[in-house]
Image (cartoon, helix red, strand yellow):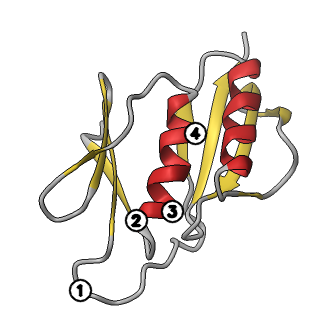
């Protein structure tokens, strides 16, 4: 459904450190930087990008927005979360763990990146 997702950042270097670490736990290579200083993380299923806003206004996170990354297993969710905390992210919501809802059982964790964007590592349990 999506070709790419792009988030704004006030400090692209801090975002690179953070996303290289958390996305690296998912097997995604370090960012490619284009001529405008934007970061691009390429995967077989799409592109995740980080940029300073093109209108020169400060970046701000979407209120109520979350970007979820599909993760292979609970151990990788935990590694993702730990890498995020160690590289400038902050934990938010409940600690990593099992959640149950009408959509089934899942194992997930939430982080805020250095610019405040909310991201999630999501593993659907069988």
How far apart are the two marked residues, 1 and 3, measured between alpha carbons? 20 Å
Residue plotted at (48% across, 22% down): 27
Image position of 16 with respect to 103: above or below: below
Q: Dot 1 corresponds to which residue?
A: 55
**Residue 33 appears left or right of 21:** left
Instruction: Assess disc 4: are there few (<14), some (14-19) or many (≥20) residues with their C-alpha within 10 Å of its C-alpha.
Output: many
Q: Dot 3 corresponds to which residue?
A: 14
In the foreground, 80 or 117: 80
> Of circles 1 and 4, which is in front?
4
Indicate which disc residue 22 carries: 4
Image position of 76 with respect to 40: above or below: above
Q: Dot 2 corresponds to which residue?
A: 12
Q: In x, y percent, where is residue 11?
A: 45, 72
- Asked whether the beta carbons under mark 1 and mark 3 sit within 8 Å of each other, the answer is no
Residue at the extreme left of the image, as rendered: 35
Image position of 34 with respect to 57: above or below: above
Q: In x, y percent, where is residue 101?
A: 79, 35
How far apart are the two marked residues, 1 and 4, measured between alpha carbons? 28 Å
How far apart are the two marked residues, 3 and 2, measured between alpha carbons? 5 Å
First in sequence: mark 3 vs mark 4 = 3
Q: In x, y percent, where is residue 39?
A: 30, 52
């Amino acid at each position: 459904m999506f070709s790419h997702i792009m988030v704004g950042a006030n400090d692209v270097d801090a975002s690179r450190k953070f996303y290289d670490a958390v996305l690296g736990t998912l097997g995604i290579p370090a960012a490619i930087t284009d001529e405008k200083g934007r970061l691009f993380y390429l995967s077989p299923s799409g592109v995740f990008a980080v940029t300073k806003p093109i209108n020169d206004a400060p970046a701000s996170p979407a209120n109520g927005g979350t970007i979820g990354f599909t993760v292979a297993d609970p151990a990788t969710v935990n590694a993702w979360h730990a890498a995020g905390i160690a590289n400038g992210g902050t934990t938010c919501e409940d600690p990593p763990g099992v959640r149950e809802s009408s959509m089934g059982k899942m194992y997930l964790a939430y982080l805020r990146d250095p610019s405040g964007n909310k991201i999630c590592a999501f593993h659907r349990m069988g």
